[in-house]
C-alpha cells in the first residue's frame, strides 16, 4: 500500500482527498479498519488535529464510522447521497423520540427518589461529560450520565429498557455529532447547560424542573431535525 504524504496548504482538504483516494481505489476497502490516529497522521504527513478533522469529514459523509472501543472503519466506497443522509436523520429522529419518552419519566422519578449517593454519582458523571476530550468519549460519558439518572429512578424495568436501547442511542448520538449542520459548537454548549440543569433539578428534588431540563435537551434536537424536514410535525 502506498500513501502519498500531504504537502499543500489546505491540509484538511488534502487529507480528506487522500483518504477518499485510498477508499475509492480499494486500498482501504469497505470493512477495513483505519490506522490509529498517530499512525494515520504519520502516513498522511500531517498533524493529529488535521487527520482527526479529515476523519470526521468522512464520517459526516457516511464513508467512515467510528465504533467505540474498536476503531474507525470504512463503511461506504463513496460519500453517502443526500437521500441516504436524510434517511439516517429520520432514523435518528425515531430514536430520539423514544429517548425523550424514556428519559423524561426517568428524570421525573429520579428527582423524587434520588439518594445522596445518587446525587454524588450524577455530579461525578456530569464532570466526566464536561471533561470529555473527543466525540467518542463525549458519547460514552453522556450515556453514563443518563444511565445514572435512570438508576436513580429506582425502577428496574426502566433500567432494562434503557440498557436494551443503549446501542441505538450510541449510534444515533454518533450520527448527530458527525452531522455538523445539526450539532455545531453552539448547540453543544446549550446541551451541556441543559445537562447541568437536569442534575441540579434532581439534586434539589424538583421533578418539574427535571422534566423541563430533559425536554429542553431532547426537544432541541428533535426541533432541529424537524427544521430539516425530518420526522412528523
Image: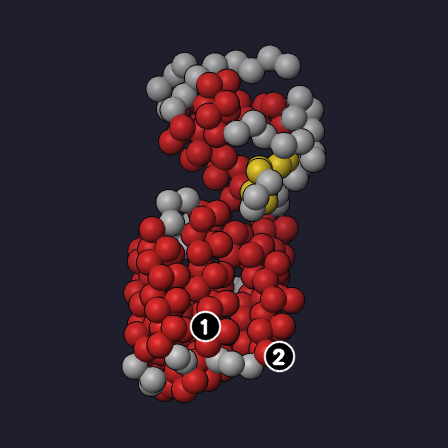
Q: Give the residue drawn at x 50%, y 74%.
A: 151
Q: Which residue is mark 2?
A: 157
Q: Give the residue drawn at x 46%, y 76%.
A: 152
Spot occupied by residue 203 in the image (x, y as percentages of width and height):
32, 77
Q: Residues within 10 Å of mark 2 (few under 14, many from 20)?
A: few
Whether 87 is drawn above or below 137: the answer is below
Which callout, 1 or 2, points at the residue further toward the start of the chain?
1
Comparing 133 with 183, the one in front is 133
Image quadrant in which the N terminus is located: top right
Whether 135 is drawn above or below 162: the answer is above
Judge left or right: residue 138 versus residue 21.
left
Task: Specify whether residue 158 is in view.
Answer: yes
Task: Specify whether residue 224 is in view.
Answer: no
Whether 12 is drawn above or below 107: the answer is above
Q: Residues within 10 Å of mark 1 (few under 14, many from 20)?
A: many
Q: Which mark is residue 149?
A: 1
Q: Give the residue drawn at x 30%, y 74%.
A: 200
- Name the secondary structure under disc 1: helix
Whether 123 is drawn above or below 182: the answer is below
- Name the secondary structure under disc 2: helix
Spot occupied by residue 82 in the image (x, y as percentages of width and height):
58, 48
Q: Give the residue drawn at x 61%, y 23%.
A: 22
Judge left or right: residue 27 versus residue 184.
right
Spot occupied by residue 12 in the image (x, y as percentages of width and height):
41, 28
Could you tell me how far apart the alpha carbons at marks 1 and 2 are, in whole angstroms? 14 Å
Judge left or right: residue 222 versus residue 167.
left
Quadrant of residue 30 in the image?
top right
Spot occupied by residue 174 in the image (x, y as percentages of width and height):
52, 52
Quadrant of residue 165 in the image?
bottom right
Quadrant of residue 47 in the image?
top left
Comparing 232 with 25, the one in front is 25
Comparing 16 with 216, the one in front is 216
Amino acid at each position: 500500500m502506498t500513501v502519498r504524504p500531504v504537502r499543500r496548504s489546505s491540509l484538511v482538504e488534502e487529507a480528506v482527498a487522500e483518504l477518499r483516494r485510498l477508499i475509492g481505489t480499494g486500498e482501504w476497502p469497505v470493512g477495513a479498519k483505519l490506522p490509529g490516529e498517530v499512525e494515520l497522521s504519520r502516513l498522511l504527513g500531517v498533524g493529529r488535529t488535521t487527520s482527526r478533522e479529515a476523519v470526521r469529514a468522512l464520517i459526516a459523509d457516511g464513508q467512515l464510522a467510528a465504533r467505540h472501543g474498536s476503531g474507525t472503519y470504512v463503511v461506504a466506497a463513496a460519500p453517502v447521497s443526500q437521500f441516504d443522509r436524510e434517511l439516517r436523520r429520520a432514523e435518528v429522529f425515531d430514536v430520539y423520540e423514544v429517548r425523550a419518552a424514556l428519559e423524561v419519566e426517568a428524570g421525573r422519578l429520579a428527582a423524587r427518589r434520588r439518594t445522596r449517593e445518587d446525587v454524588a454519582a450524577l455530579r461525578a458523571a456530569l464532570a466526566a461529560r464536561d471533561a470529555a476530550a473527543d466525540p467518542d468519549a463525549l458519547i460514552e460519558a453522556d450515556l453514563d450520565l443518563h444511565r445514572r439518572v435512570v438508576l436513580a429512578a429506582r425502577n428496574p424495568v426502566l433500567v432494562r429498557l434503557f440498557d436494551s436501547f443503549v446501542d441505538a442511542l450510541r449510534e444515533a448520538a454518533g450520527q448527530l455529532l458527525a452531522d455538523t449542520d445539526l450539532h455545531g459548537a453552539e448547540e453543544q454548549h446549550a446541551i451541556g447547560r441543559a445537562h447541568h440543569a437536569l442534575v441540579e433539578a434532581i439534586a434539589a428534588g424538583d421533578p418539574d424542573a427535571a422534566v423541563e431540563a430533559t425536554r429542553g435537551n431532547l426537544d432541541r434536537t428533535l426541533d432541529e431535525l424537524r427544521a430539516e424536514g425530518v420526522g412528523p410535525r
